[in-house]
Image: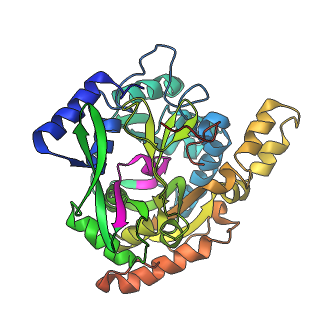
Amino acid sequence: MSLGHPELVAAISSEIIGNGPIPFVRFMELALYHPHYGYYMRQPDGADQERIGWSGDFYTSSDVHPILGRAIAAQARQMDELLGHPTPFTIVEMGAGKGLLARDCLAAIHAKQDDFASRVRYVLIERSPAMQALQRQNLAPWLNQPGLVTWVEGLDALGPQSVTGLFFSNELVDAFPVHRIQMVAGQVQELFVDYRDGRFEECLKPLSNPALDQYIRKLEPSWPDGYRTEVNLQALDWMAQVAQRIDRGFVVTIDYGHTAEDLYGPERKDGTFLCYYQQLTGDVPYVRIGEQDMTAHVDFTGLATVGAAAGLEVTGFTNQMSFLMGLGVEEMIGQLDPESPEFGAAIHLLKPDGMGRTFKILMQHRGIERPDLDGLKFKPFFGSALISNQAQGKGQEARGHYPTSHHSPLTPSLRG
């Protein structure tokens, strides 16, 4: 079986040969985001191939049906009212994939040629030229309206407190490179990647980053030997940076993940790291390098805690099913033929044993008294847990205590 994209394999192996074994987080960064050969940064090899979608390696909610984009548009309208109808109302989407969610959201907003539609400005943060090209294709109907849709390559392009409106992401954080760690003889070791005899191999070493050690200490883990999991430090840095960009408004993070208590519980002894290739899941990242996606579940407690420290209050924590129902998805679906493929696709996003509960939604706000949002009208059982944990985290921050679908494959597993 191929190790992966030849130039990418050469770049990673050359770095290891020159500097010694690298932390897994560095390996994942290069595999996904190498500026020339990374999975997300280059065009697929075949002209008819795609990364995301029914014929790609995985699909997202926006590939299934436009109701998520319509629901986000409806939620944005309510947010606009709560903020007093600012001009402009800025919607920032980071990591927009092919731009389908942006397309669906803009279509729903502009279906009503009203004051809100005239004040909306949509900013996409995208560093991948390949993805940005796809986004421009899907957003072509709105590109002839000056200033309506713009692109920037990173958060740094947005000034401090420059956003009044909504900042959201869908399946972004799970694709940030992660540290992988394992308990060995009562000590936490970090997974490194070596290159020997033409193959990539794992080895365990002391933690590479003081921030990683600090994060683990906050968890106060009692893991057994052999326990393996992931730590997404980049997600925490990202949330702190996002908070700095918000003047008044909301941050909505949609992804698959758990509270810290659940994510680092004893039942997840092998962690949550997965690879996605042609709608199959696997757990071997050292083949098909640059040709398969890599992900890990999100620690929503960590995001809420870091956000609170940076001035973002938790508005609520829900799942995709409850979010969609609160925003009137039943009315949207009620207009469809129950025998139609479109009806089945919409229902797929609501299934409690699938995407409906697998995807969680963290909503935060700044510069407004605690708002009541329709997307939080129905709170599932785990909603209060995150909020209470986050509130505890604010009080315990001085001593640094963390209270203790997804990319959807069509086939359950692929190994090797």
Instruction: Check the image and report above or below for 10 versus 316.
Output: above
Question: Does residue 150 show up?
Answer: yes
Q: Is residue 325 magenta?
A: no
Where residue 248 appears, as percent x and y from the top left, is: 42, 62
Q: What's the image's color scheme?
A: rainbow
Q: Is residue 179 magenta?
A: yes
Instruction: Check the image and report above or below for 243 versus 287.
Output: below
Front position in the image: 12 or 85: 12
Relative to residue 26, is residue 130 drawn left or right? Answer: right
Q: Quadrant of residue 5?
A: top left
What are the residue bounds of the magenta stretch? 164-183
Front position in the image: 301 or 240: 301
Q: Residue at x 54, y 54 (%)?
A: 256
Q: Residue at x 33, y 37 (%)?
A: 31
Relative to residue 74, is residue 121 drawn left or right? Answer: left
**Quarter the N terminus occupies:** top left
Specify the farthest residue to the front. Answer: 197
Where residue 341 appears, as percent x and y from the top left, is: 79, 31
Instruction: Check the image and report above or below for 207 versus 28.
Output: below
Relative to residue 397, is residue 296 drawn left or right? Answer: right
Q: Residue at x 44, y 72 (%)?
A: 224
Question: Does residue 144 show up?
Answer: no
Q: How many marks?
A: 0
Where residue 386 appears, as percent x and y from the top left, is: 53, 73
Query: Which secondary structure dominates the residues rendered in magenta?
Result: strand
Where residue 198 appears, as percent x and y from the top left, is: 26, 30
Front position in the image: 409 or 236: 409
Q: Residue at x 45, y 83 (%)?
A: 392
Specify the farthest residue to the top. Answer: 47
